[in-house]
Amino acid sequence: MVSIVITTHGKLATTFLDVAESVLGKQEAVVAVDVMPQEGKEEILQHLTQAVSRVEQQDGVLILAGIFGESDCQISLSLFRGNGIRVVTGLNLPMLLKVLTHRSDLDLNALAASACESGKAGIIDCGLDSTRV
């Protein structure tokens, strides 16, 4: 099973995990890292390092980050990319639910690809795409 680290600014990472667990039940080997505005790079680095070390890494770790370019994403990319760790940005709820549902079925690379696909598929302009309503 691929382990998951969710990281965003504010308390959104914890909220995403809470919502996902309300739908799917309690999740093992998943950690949320909330990054507060007053935290510097050293604190963010410490939180992310602790999170990665807390999850089991037998089948790899997928870090789901909020926005590309934010400090938590940059730190994740600079420190953890490679060595059984992948980073995917643009976190949304459809992406997270898909990842949590299939992390036992897919390897790390396939799970990262699935995260990207489901994240994009979850974005729908309902005013233009009335066939999906």
Image: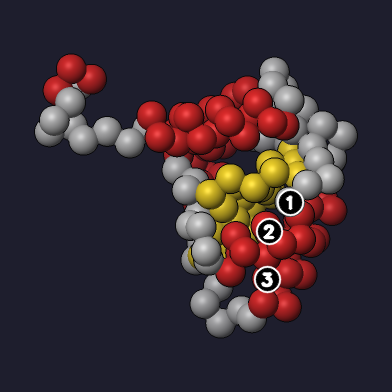
Question: Quadrant location of the C terminus?
Answer: top left
Look at the numbered disc 1 and give the secondary structure of its residue: loop
Circle 3 is placed at which residue position? 44
3D distance between C-alphas at marks 1 and 3: 16 Å
Q: How many marks?
A: 3
3D distance between C-alphas at marks 1 and 2: 7 Å
Which circle marks residue 76 in the picture?
A: 2
Residue 48: percent from left, percent from top: 72, 61
Q: Nearer the viewer, mark 2 or mark 3?
A: 2
Q: Are marks 1 and 2 in contact (CB under 8 Å)?
A: yes
Q: 10 Å neighbourhood of mark 3: few (<14), some, or many (≥20)? A: many
Q: Is residue 112 left or right of residue 131?
A: right
Give the amino acid type for the residue marked by disc 1 in the picture.
Answer: Arg
3D distance between C-alphas at marks 2 and 3: 10 Å
Q: Residue at x 18, y 32 (%)?
A: 126
Q: Is residue 24 above or below residue 85?
A: above
Q: Is residue 53 above or below residue 109?
A: below
Q: Residue at x 56, y 52 (%)?
A: 65
Indicate which disc, 1 or 2, sits on the residue closer to the N terminus: 2
Q: Are marks 1 and 3 in contact (CB under 8 Å)?
A: no
Circle 1 is placed at which residue position? 81
Question: Quadrant location of the N terminus?
Answer: top right
Q: Is residue 115 left or right of residue 128?
A: right
Look at the numbered disc 2 and give the secondary structure of its residue: helix
